Structure formats: structure tokens, C-alpha cells
Amino acid sequence: MKIKGTLIPIGGNEDKGFEDDEIHRLDYIEEGILSHVVNEAGGVDAKIVIIPTASSIPVEVGENYITAFSTLGCSKIDVLNIKSKSDSEREDFISLIKEADCVMFSGGDQSKISKYIGGTTIHKILSDRYINDEKFVIAGTSAGAMAMANEMIAGGSSAKAFVKGAVIMKKGLNLAPKLIVDTHFIQRGRFGRISEAVAKFPNLLGIGLAEDTGMIIKNGNDCTVIGSGMAIVFDGSHLTHNNEKILKIGTPMTMTNLKVHVLANGDHFNLDTRQVKVLPIESPFV
């Protein structure tokens, strides 16, 4: 099945144009992640819908994104605070999703996204438009990125890395069925958490996104890294030893021949062929 739309998972804490954090070192207007989101959605006239469902402070989060996208020149911005399954069946909310050029999911608790949106009319419209509309963009940061997967990381301790049971898995929105996505990846030390997830589902690719880092995924397959940090790809398709299935909860795990790629801004990765194309070192975008 050919997918026409665009997915943009983001590792969280992306530059919104008003932070002083040292990791945000790309020019916000020209190279920032949200600038990429706007460009992919068709430019400053794009209709952007923010969904802060995952957040515990949805009003504040919605206002922050309105400010961030307004700074980039956008004016057609709506916030849908979906707080229940019934909200995902509201006709006014459905109309906005049908008309949107871009839907942006905020961070927070990814389980809220799957709980309140999964299996609803809005979920169906998002999926259908992503498959069939080449101008449609779905972006998500932190929890919003993690919820794009079918096998979704819903929680788990980074401190107990490489111990069976450290990761909690639930079903996500199945927009990126080839992936398991983890976020805040470098900053929160989640190498072990995603390794266990890949051990559970070795046919899937694990993607660990650092903060202020994302991927533009075209055709459901072609990935380009954006942002100021790293995207770590975990490929378990050639594991020669994986004892996840036979271990008891709390037991340290063994995985051998796990392939890991460390990618940065401008690098490309193909989800089907699992091939990397690295941006030339002389490129001005490095």
C-alpha cells in the first residue's frame, strides 16, 4: 500500500522560538523543527490543528504552540482539547480534522491519545487522510510521536535498563506500524528501554529521538532526520541471540548482533531496505 501523507515524529522539547536552552542551536525560522512542519504542510497559509490531549496542562500547551506557529507566520491555528472518546466524535472537531493541512499532537501521556482517540471517527479520518492525501501532515512531539506506533511504549524505567519488564507496551494509533518510537532519548537515557521493546518485536525498527530532533517520514518509508540532536535507529532483524521470551520479569537480558545507527540532521534512512544515506560532510547543513 502506497502512503501519500507525511509523518513527523519529534523527540520532545523542540525549539518553539523562545527558549534559551543550549541544545536549540539551529535557526528557528529557517531550520527549526516547527519550521519544517509548516513547510511540509504547505507554508504559512496551512491550517494547523493542535491536539494537546496527552498534556496535563492542555491550555498552556495550546497557547505555546499558537505562539510558536504564529512566530513562523501562521495564522490559521486551532486547538482541539480532546478529553474523552465522545470528544473524538464531535462534528465540529471532526470538521476541523477534515479541513486541516497539519495535525500536531503535543507531549504528555501517550496512553491518553490512544485511549481518547484510538478507534474513533477522528482516528479513522487521520489514518485515511495520511494514507490518501499527499498534502496532509501528522506531527507529534514526545508522547505525540510515541503514539504514532502500533506497538507503543507506554512507560517504563530507564534506571532498570536491559531488565525484562522495564518497558510497558500498549497499542498506539498504528500510523507508523514499522516503528517503535521513544523520545527524550539521549537526555533520559532510554537505550535499554527501547532495546527491550525491540527484543519483544524484533521485526520492528526502534527509533530513539533526542530532544529538538525529529524525522520527516515520506511514503511511510523514507526518513530524513531534522533538528539539532541525534536519531538512533535500532535494527533487531539480524539478532543472533535474544532471550526475551524465556526470561522471568526482572531478569537481565541478552541481545547479540543488534544493529544501531546514529544519525544526525540531514541523514536519510529507508524503513524497508534499512539502508542509511549520510549527508556529505562538506554539506552546509551539517
Image: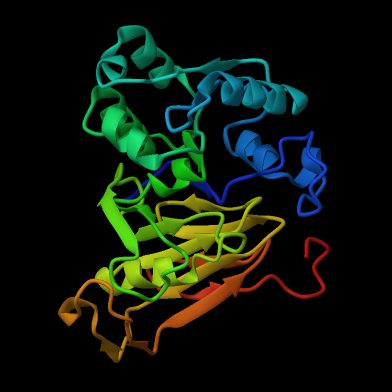
Answer yes or no: is residue 6 visible: no
Q: Residue at x 25, y 23 (%)?
A: 121
Q: Is residue 57 above or below residue 225?
A: above
In the image, farthest residue toward the top = 92
Q: Residue at x 44, y 82 (%)?
A: 259
Where is residue 202 shown, x and y percent of the image?
29, 73
Where is residue 83 shown, x and y percent of the image?
36, 20
Where is residue 172 shown, x and y percent of the image?
30, 45
Residue 167 versus residue 236: which sits nearer the camera? 167
- Work out which quarter of the rendered image holds the C terminus and state it: bottom right
Where is residue 260 shown, x and y percent of the image?
49, 79
Q: Is residue 256 above or below residue 94?
A: below
Q: Residue at x 54, y 76 (%)?
A: 261
Q: Quadrant of residue 16?
A: top right
Q: Is 33 on the left or on the right of 149, as rendered?
A: right
Q: How is the image coloured?
A: rainbow
Q: Is residue 256 above or below residue 118?
A: below
Answer yes or no: is residue 115 visible: yes
Q: Is 35 on the left or on the right of 164, as rendered?
A: right
Q: Residue at x 25, y 21 (%)?
A: 85
Q: Quadrant of residue 35?
A: top right
Residue 68 versus residue 255: which sits nearer the camera? 255
Q: Quadrant of residue 93?
A: top left
Q: Is 284 on the left or on the right of 268, as rendered?
A: right
Residue 35 versus residue 23: which sits nearer the camera? 23
